[in-house]
Image (cartoon, rainbow, N blue to C red):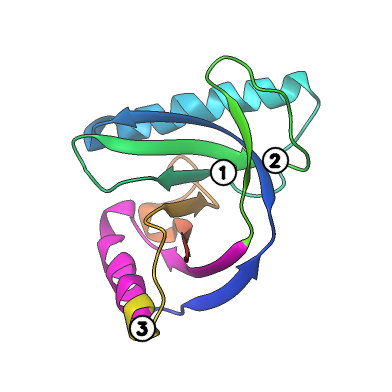
Amino acid sequence: MLAIELSEEKAQPVVSIRTTTKLELLPQVIGESYMKIMSYLQEFGEKPVCAPFTAYHNLDMQNLDVEMGFPIARLLPEKDDIKARELPPGKVVSSIYKGPYSGMEQPYNEMFKWIEENGYTSTGIYFEYYFNSPQEVPESELLTKIVMPLI
């Protein structure tokens, strides 16, 4: 059984790149975006304040609307396709999933069910925060925090 937590989040400054892609190209798009943003952050002498995220603005696997980014301490100026914004404050449901990315459908479904059973409504945007990567650990050890903002 998945541990699901309801919490109140504060506003969080982020820098991110938003694009559309197909599911099979997603790992490459995420990797390139993170490298570009890290290089940008180094220009300002800034470091992320938390794990990198990918926000899914839809779940259309052939035309995914995704946003890759990093939480930061303060808003920075935008540059090219790197945007600066603040994630709004509010209630979220979250859970930590351990295992391969290919197994994430189950925790998502459990979270959707929890939201419905508890009378909440999701905004329809889903965040995944990656605490490690397949380059660092075996797939079975991957840690991903799934966050679903609520209306």
117 with respect to 123 (left or right): left
38 with respect to 6 (left or right): right
Please, what secondary structure does the residue beneath circle 3 have? loop
Q: Which residue is mark 1?
A: 52
Which sits earlier in the primary sequence, circle 2 or circle 3?
3
149 with respect to 122 (left or right): right
Classify 10 Å Cα crowding around label 1: few (below 14), some (14-19), many (20 and above).
many
Residue drawn at 75 percent across, 18 percent down: 43
Q: Amino acid at mark 1?
A: Pro
The verdict on residue 103 being magenta is yes
Please, what secondary structure does the residue beneath circle 1 have? loop
Which sits earlier in the primary sequence, circle 3 or circle 1?
3
Residue drawn at 74 percent across, 29 percent down: 76
Residue drawn at 27 percent across, 70 percent down: 109
Q: Quadrant of the N terminus?
A: bottom left
135 with respect to 41 (left or right): left
* Alpha carbon distance from label 2 to label 1: 8 Å
Q: Which residue is mark 2?
A: 48
Quadrant of residue 140 in the image? Answer: bottom left
Q: Which residue is mark 3?
A: 1
Residue drawn at 61 percent across, 40 percent down: 70
Q: Total of numbered circles in the picture? A: 3
Q: Amino acid at mark 3?
A: Met
